[in-house]
Amino acid sequence: MDFLIPEDLKDLKNMVRTFVRKELMPLEEEVERSGKIPEEALQKMRELGFFGLTIPTEYGGSGIGTFGYCLAAEELGWAHSAFKTICGVNNGIGSKPIVLDGTEEQKRKYLPKIASGEYITAFALSEPGAGSDAANISTQAVRKGDRYIINGRKHFITNGPLADLVTVLAVTDKEKRAHGGITAFLVEKGTPGFSVGQIHKTMGSRGVYHSELIFDNCEVPAENVIGKEGMGFITAMKTLDDGRLTLAASCVGTAERLLEMSTEYAKRRVTFGKPIAERQAIQWMLADSATEIYAAKMMVYATAIRYDKGERIPAEVAMTKLYATEMVNRVADRAVQIHGGMGWIQELPVERIYRDVRVTRLYEGTSEIQRIIIARNILGYKGGLEG
Amino acid sequence: MNIIVCIKQVPDTTTKVRVGKDGKHIDPGGVKFIVNTYDDFAVEEAIRLKERFGGEVTVISMGPERVKEALRMCLAMGADKAIQLWDPAFEDSDPYTTALILSKAIQQLPYDIIFCGKQAIDRDTMSVPVYLAELLGLPQATLVVKLEVDPNARKFIAYRDIEGAKEVIEGLLPAVISTQWKLNEPRYPTLPNIMKAKKKELKELNAAALGLDSAQVGEKGSRVKVLSMELPPPRSKGKILKGDPREVCRELVRLLREEAKVI
Ligand SMILES: Cc1cc2nc3c(=O)[nH]c(=O)nc-3n(C[C@H](O)[C@H](O)[C@H](O)COP(=O)(O)OP(=O)(O)OC[C@H]3O[C@@H](n4cnc5c(N)ncnc54)[C@H](O)[C@@H]3O)c2cc1C
């Protein structure tokens, strides 16, 4: 597959691979135990430019496209999931709205800080009453002179408690909603009326935090509108398209690691006088995992390359997200099975990875939502998902 | 300062090496290649000198097309220029001919100091830097763990760890310095610099460009030939001795003496 990758991106992938193995993988137990990424590791990632890979060079990033970031995400997928998340948000949902639709002033003001990792970012769309049905949000923004007043409650927001800068989606026209009635705002930490609500306790992904964000008469200047009033839903959907591909890429990396661990374990573990690797039952599990990883990788590479060429292919993006996330869950399940009891015990990373991959089928659009997008494309249905 | 670094691309330390069909080479299929570990210290030291005293760092590597990847990594770390030396005639060069080829390239360049890793982790001969210094007629310091350079006085002081002691030597520049792992902590190339490395100069020179003819290089010019290569025999199973501790000790000593022949 290497033939698909240009030289500079090959070098980049190699470097991320080396860094992940030497610097990040040894920290995974510590992250899991303390629930925190060590500051030293974050600092190294900042200095090496991990937070600004996708941000254009004129704003302090490396300016690589979605395919390039997919290659980095694939390698980051080998490390504890906290690393790919913290890095993924600044390169994805945390910066994309500004990169795609922000004003020149917003780009100059925020992108360099996001690229350097000085700012941790978040993207706040989901609400208790609006998950899959994202256009159903009830957070409202009302214009008052040259300011907007935001009221509402977001939840499940990745980096919520830490974020210095949040992109918030709010309704500015109840009639129009997804069709010109939702606006994206930039809200900085410390803005009066903006606070962090409950921090969610989760099944996995220790080391990153998800929380509610509360807007109580939170006032922001009109210049904090991303793009124009009413464009927010389109900005959000474009942002999520890109995120689905890079998430799929990280699943490929995680699955490769699970397969490597399973293979090594199967060769070492002897039962009834022979390594379990010599049993067909185990070999078939390894073969299925390897095959599915290969398929997912091809989907990621092909789709990301097309995406970077400017093709609008939401169905293919949905297929890739759907297949790669479900694939890594199957591979994790087999990995636990091959490890037997050791797959359930916290001594090996398999147990944690099994828990951590579960969420990939939920966020950035659940598997069901991906299937709906794909099916509607086949059937030629247009418009929103309602009905 | 004009600083030159000679690097080699070698199989990654985690690669499971296989011997090729001819029984003389490593099978390159599926092998991941990296910059030789000791060369990282050489590149780092070169860049630090440049950052301190100004000047230019040129990295040189002899090897086939794939070594460009290693050269680009060095450019991403902060080297300014790279030169790949390759010609089909260079195939199977021994350490002497390798040093000869490197020396011809270096003679075409201005230089104040030349760095090499103390050894390549694939063949472990530790001889290229030594030959190179001889061929260029330069002073040398090998296995250097600390280095002080005074470009104005054109002098260097090199610290070497020797058996049970530290040796400090002073010499004149230009010189060849071979680097040992304690010298510094090599930086990772930053991700933006990796993306920019492709824009830096990477030149290719063949035998003719170096004024070498094919009888001088490759297997023909070599003084050492590889006759065969094989993997170490698989480790045999360990033995567990059971019973009365006195008996077990006696048996252990006997086995160490007679079977393992280590005492
Ligand atoms: C760890 C984590 C991090 C997150 N980070 C963020 C973030 O940073 N920012 C943000 O805005 N959001 C974030 N989210 C929210 C995430 O995007 C939503 O959880 C997701 O979109 C699903 O919404 P929901 O949880 O409300 O599920 P629901 O929409 O309530 O869905 C419940 C179930 O019903 C199914 N379903 C829903 N509609 C249909 C339908 N029409 N047909 C068939 N089945 C259907 C779903 O697939 C699912 O199985 C995060 C979530 C998690 C778990």
Image (tube, rainbow, N blue to C red):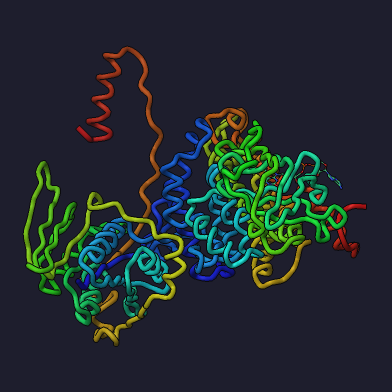
Location of residue A103 (image quadrant): bottom right
Residue A25 seen anywhere in this rendered image of the structure: yes
Residue at horizontal 12 percent and vertical 44 percent from the top? B163
Q: Is A26 situated above or below A229?
A: above
In the rendered image, residue A19, in percent from the top left (x then y), is placed at 44, 52
Q: Is any atom of residue A296 visible in this view?
A: no
Q: Nearer the viewer, residue B13 or A29?
A: A29
Of residue B213 and residue A222, the one placed in the foreground of this image is A222
Point 33% across, 74% down: residue: B82
In the visual, does A40 lie left or right of B174?
Answer: right
Q: Give the residue furthest to the front.
A: A145
Residue B16, relative to residue B226: is it above or below?
above
Q: At 61% from the left edge and 42% from the top edge, which residue is drawn? A: A192
| Screen quadrant of the N terminus of chain A | bottom right
Position in image of residue A370 (x %, y %): 79, 53
Residue B240, position as x, y percentages in the image: 38, 24
Q: Quadrant of residue A277?
A: top right
Above-or-below relation of B4 to B166: below
Q: How many marks?
A: 0
Left or right relative to A384: residue A5: left
Residue A366 lies, in percent from the top left, at: 76, 47
Work out whether residue A297 or residue A171 is closer to the camera in this orientation and state it: A171
- Between A274 and B41, the residue placed more toward the observer is B41
Residue farthest to the top, as pictured:
B244
Up-down relation of residue A245 to residue B105 (above or below)? above
Ligand 1 is found in which quarter of the picture? Answer: top right
